[in-house]
Each structure stands twice: as C-alpha cells, then as structure tokens.
Image (tube, grey):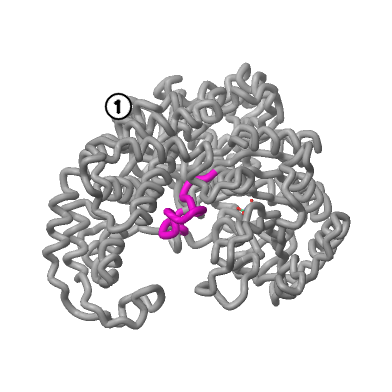
Amino acid sequence: MTSGDLRKKYIEFFKKRGHKEIPSASLVPEHDPTVLFTTAGMHSLVPYLLGEKHPMGKRLVNVQKCIRTDDIEEVGDNRHLTFFEMLGNWSLDGYFKNEAITWSWEFLVDKKEGLGLAPEKIFVSAFEGDSDAPRDEEPIKIWSELFKKSGIDAKVDVPLSGGGRIFTYDKSKNFWGPAGMTGPCGPNSEMFYDTDKPHNPAFGKICHPNCDCGRFIEIWNDVFMEYNKTAGGKYVLLKQKNVDTGMGTERTLAILNGFDSVYETDVLAPIVAKIKDQIPKTKTTAHKSKTEEIKSIRIIADHTRASVFMISDGIMPSNIERGYILRRLLRRAIRHGRMLKMPENFLAPLIEVVINIYKENYSDLNRNKTKILNEIKKEEGKFEKTLEAGMREFKKIEWVGVADEALPKRGSFAGHAEPQISGKVAFNLYQTYGFPIELTLELAKEQGRLVDISGFQKELRKHQELSRTAAAGKFKGGLSDQGEQAVKYHTATHLLLAALRKVLGEHIYQRGSNITAERLRFDFSHPEKMTKEQIQKVEDLVNEQIQKNLSVSFAEMALEDAKRLGATHSTSSGSPRGIRGAMGIFETKYGERVKVYAIGDEKTGIFSREICGGPHAANTGILGKFKIQKEEASSSGVRRIKAVLE
Ligand code: SER
C-alpha cells in the first residue's frame, strides 16, 4: 500500500461517516504562542476544541504534517521521525468514545473499507486514572466487546502470556495534551500492532504494548478531550466533549507492507535510495559498521525531509527559535553526509526527491522549490566551510575539569566524573565554527565525554544572546489562559493588516504572525523599509478604529464567496498571501467553507475582512492604545512589525 492509497482510504472512510475534509495547517502554529511547531493536529483546532463553532461542522478529517523534535536522538532507528504526517478524525462536541473506538477498530480490521489487519495482532491501552481524572472504564468496555465479536477474549491488565490485550497506563502514556502548558486535553486509548519480534530483555523483564523493545508499534491514538488544564494545574471538565485521533502514516504503511522500518515506505525509500546513490563507491566511510552507516543515511533522509517542509512553511535557518531547530537539523544532516563521504551539495538532489514525493498533496513545495534549494544550499555552503576546521578544533580540545553540580543529573552522563568540554570551548565551537551545541554534545557523547552546558549558556548570555534551544519554558501560559489578552492582540493584528494595506498598498499580505499576552509580531510582504510617516499613519489608522469601537463579527461562507468579498487570508506556506495564498492550499478542496471575520459593519463601514478561525474581541473599543514599537527586515522582501496594546 502506498501513502496515497492510505490517505485516500482514511479520508473516504471518515467522509462516509459524515466527516468533512480540512487541509493540513502550517508547521508554524498561527496565533498559538505556546509551541514552536505544529506537533499534532490539535494546534490549529484549539479554539474549536474550546467551543468556537467550526465552519465545516462537528466532524472533521485531515492529514496533518507535524514536526516533533523530542525524539531526535532516536531518529535512525526503525520508527522515529522528526517530520511525519498524521491522519486524524475529529469530533467537536459530537460523537464520543463509542463511535471513535468502534470506527478505529473497523478501519483497522475491515477488509473492504479499512486496512484488513488481523484482529489478533492489535493490542490496546487505556488510562488507569489518578487524582486528576478517574480511570477511563468506557474504552475498556468498548474494546472488550469489539475483541469478543472477533472471537478474542481480551483480558485487562494481565501479562501477555495470560491473555492480556487491554493494558492501562498512567498519564505519561495515556493522557494527551494540552498542546502547550494549558488547554484542552484528556485520557486516550492507543492501538498497537504486534510485530511478533522476540522481546529484548534489555528493555524490561516482560514485554507489554508500551515496552520500547520494538515488538509493539504504536499506530493510532484516540484522545477523548473532555478536560481543560488551567494555569493553576487543575483539570476541569470542558463544556463540550471532543475526539482527536491521530494515526501515524509512515508507521502504519510500514506495518501494512511488512517492512522492517519506516524508511522502506514510499515517502522515504526514494530519499534513502538517492542518498545511497551519492555515496562514493571508491571511498570508505568514517563509520565502523554497516549499522552506523544505515543510521547516518536515515538521519539525512529524515532531517532533509523535515527541512524542506519547514522552509516551505516560511522558516529560515537562524540562531533562534524555529530557525535554530532548522539549522540544527540541516547541520546534523550535513555532518552525517560528511561521515558518509558524500560530495558537496549532496542535499540538493535529495530536495528534488522530497518535492517529487509530496508535490501532489502539498502544492506549495513546488512553488517554493527555488527558495528551498537556495536556503539549503546556502546553509550547506556556510557550514561546510567551517565544519572541517571545527572538527579539527574539536579533536584538539583539551579535556578539562570534571562533572560538577551544574551538569545534568539524568541521562547517560549522570553521576560520571569524566573530563568535560568547558563552556568556553563549546561556545567557541558554536560561535566560530557554527556548531549547534547539540552537535558538540553529540560528538562528545560519541567519545563518552561531557560538556559543561551551564558554562556554555553563561558564555552565550555574556554575548547577549538568548539561548532558545528548546521550546520548553519559553512561554508561561497557554493560549487558552492568556485568553483575553491574546484575543485582543489577535483582533489588533487584523486591524494592522488592513491599515497596512490602506497605507502601503494591496501588495501587502501576511507572511507570519505570532502573538503572546504581551505583544504582537506581524510579518508582511513589502520590499522596503517603512518611513516614519508611514508607520505613524498605520498606527493612527489602527487607533482610530479602536476609538470608533467597531463591532467584530463573523459569517461562514464558501471560500469562493470570501474571495469575492475581497477577504484577506494568511497562510504560512510562503506563497503570495491573501486569497491567492488561500487558494493555494485550498485548491483541491472545492466548496470549502470558511469563517470570515469583519471589523465594522454596514453603518460604520467595514474596515477589515479576513478569513480566520477566531477567536476575537467583540468590539475594538476594549483593545487599548495601539503602539508600533519596531519595524524591521525579517527576510528578503518581508518586513516585521512588533506592536503592543497599552
Ligand atoms: N494528538 C494525539 C496525538 O498526537 C492524537 O491526534 O497522538
């Protein structure tokens, strides 16, 4: 089965059951300050999970592209990836546990409409309960009955050898969300496929579905979102019950085809083949074993694919936030390329392959091809220049000191008093040779050495840079809690775009937006620096609309009608913004219904019309005073405004 077959089958299955297909959201979550990347389908749907009405109804189905970097160390094994596609069906205050689980089961085992997997190969889990939320009995009951109908006596929480088939776990395994620190969440029920591989006792005495030995592969997760986690850490019942399911495309494909790894599926195998093609036959690689070589090949394949999608969604290599993650992925791929003795610019042919695989489902990739090729080539060139010198420097490092209190207590270095790379040296590698700190860590780890990370961070701070190596801790609250303030900024962003278009012209489109409870940041297409007068004009125009206390309302309509009304729309796919951009991503979904937010009415005149999911302030009068703090270049042809509401 190919990825195309699987996507089609999934979408058709749920369409037949009343679901409407929605397009994949960007990898850059818009209006959600709590995360760097879209890690699951729920990010773009948070307002609807909290009660906003979705224009397409209560049952949705989608294929969402996702980036997850928490498992980056595992990439290279048979199943972990930083980029993947998730198939999902959604219920927004509609059906709940019974339908969700029954349909999951049908899709997995039905031979005609579904995947036709053998029921005896499926194992499932449920939430065991704790002081925040009770044991989730309903899924256990539903699963027992479904298995029974297939002639399987599914025992609960007994070892596999005793007929165990339904297993309960704690929050770390069977509770999903919130996507940030706060927001919608709930217990989940996961489905695993038994590959029948022998258990590896290195991972524990006995095997069970969540054992990491590799015998069981998790393929699908049904989340029952019935709670909202508040800033105080409490789990309160949501006013509505939601279902969020996510099935990993690559893993499911591997299982259906009897492959040993996700790298054999049609979305990765051609990339792997192109890498192998380029490994010089006459040179020996830097690796000691075939296994290490395979790992390098897989890392390159995964990281390149992720980078292509990231750049297409508007992310550029840099030293902060998303750009830093992208740079890290690219540089890691380049280093592994070096170890395989790949020729210079070896990434370019891989990019072509990635785009070829996905061009039908993500038309923005082709549109952004030149940009993707250029950015990756630039980064490759930049890093290649210093990589060799950096590696020489690394080899010369004098190992100083021993592990101290400041070093991590967990992980493979815990408790070891090994010589370490000082913070200064790690910083020098970063500053002079462009080694992301994770690369230094990886190289050190290969030699069983330590890195003084806190020393590195001190150096970094000294050089007045913010270390943003991880999303964690970056934003204190979630969107849902910062609620009120974030909502005001959201409405102010619409006013700003409309004002910019009035002052600068119709060529202005949104190229990115990021809101916190403290400020808005808005990227837009414009070839030159704004003059002082233009900035003042825009600011005044926004404040005028605030003073007029315009009403904010929305209407649901067909995309074609929104276009006729001249509504603007933001996408992050790097395509020209405005409705043309929207047409880009929606083009295969004819008849798409969208929500159009209007600021102002017939009487006052409509100042802004934008396609947007909301939520928004009811009136502009509550926004406060709008002040532009900064106008600067963001990337070529794109300007960035930072503004606050006082
Ligand atoms: N959000 C859940 C997951 O990512 C289900 O979609 O597993």
Q: Is residue 326 visible?
A: yes
Q: Residue at x 44, y 59 (%)?
A: 74
| Residue 168 relative to residue 383: left or right | right
- Vertical comparison of 550 with 429: above or below: above
Q: Residue at x 41, y 27 (%)?
A: 368
Residue 422 picture location, percent across and down = 19, 71
Q: Residue at x 67, y 54 (%)?
A: 221
Q: Nearer the viewer, residue 137 or 541?
A: 137
Image quadrant in which you'd find residue 598 = top right
| Residue 411 relative to residue 179: left or right | left
Q: Which residue is drawn at 35% across and 54% down?
A: 290
Q: Quadrant of the N terminus?
A: top right
Residue 144 picture location, percent across and down = 83, 62
Image quadrant in which you'd find residue 89 = top right
Residue 181 picture location, percent across and down = 55, 61
Residue 259 picture location, percent across and down = 56, 47
Q: Is mark 1 on a helix, strand or loop?
A: loop
Whether residue 309 appears in magenta in the rendering, the answer is: no
Q: Is the magenta stretch mostly helix, strand or loop?
A: loop
Q: Circle 1 is placed at which residue position?
A: 528
Q: Is residue 92 visible?
A: no
- Vertical comparison of 539 with 284: above or below: above
What segment is highlighted magenta in the picture? 69-84
Whether residue 82 appears in magenta in the rendering, the answer is: yes
Hey, what amino acid is under mark 1?
A: Glu
- Vertical comparison of 100 with 395: above or below: above
Image quadrant in which you'd find residue 480 = bottom right
Q: Which of 273 and 20 is in front in this view?
A: 273
Q: Badge 1, how many Cα within 10 Å: few under 14, some, many 20+?
A: few
